[in-house]
Image (cartoon, rainbow, N blue to C red):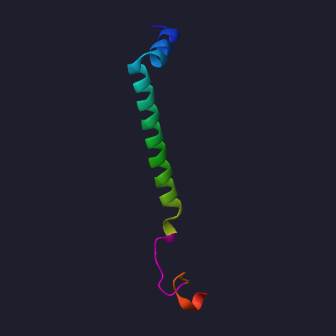
Amino acid sequence: MDIAGIFSWLFSSREGVLVLLGVILVGFLVAAIVLERKTRKDFDQYDDEDESGWSLFDDDNK
């Protein structure tokens, strides 16, 4: 099968469009998981909540 046949099947048939959308969806899912893990690793130092720090809901902080 040549490249023109693959593109023709991918964009002109219902199954091809569904495969294309599925591949795009899986790609975005993988990217979101990778970026979430990277973000969690970079900002892991902020997980500890300190009760003595600044709070939006305390009256003395306004």
Q: Is residue 36 above or below residue 8?
A: below
| Rendering coords of residue 26 (x, y %) | 42, 37
Of all residues shown, which one is farthest toward the right?
62
**Viewed as shown, does residue 45 lie left or right of 18?**
right
Task: Write the residue at 52% across / 87% down.
Answer: 58
Relative to the observer, which residue lies in front, 27 or 55? 55
Magenta stretch: dominant secondary structure: loop
Task: Write the residue at 48% across / 59% down.
Answer: 40
Q: Is residue 16 above or below residue 32?
A: above
Q: Is residue 27 above or below residue 5?
A: below
| Rendering coords of residue 34 (x, y %) | 47, 48
| Rendering coords of residue 27 (x, y %) | 46, 37
Q: Quadrant of the N terminus?
A: top left
Q: Is residue 35 above or below residue 54?
A: above
Q: Is residue 47 magenta?
A: yes
Task: Write the residue at 47% across / 40% down.
Answer: 28
Q: How many marks?
A: 0
The range drawn in magenta is 46-53
Task: Write the residue at 49% across / 8% down.
Answer: 2
Q: Quadrant of the C terminus?
A: bottom right
Of all residues shown, which one is farthest toward the bottom?
60
| Rendering coords of residue 6 (x, y %) | 47, 13
Of all residues shown, which one is farthest toward the left?
15
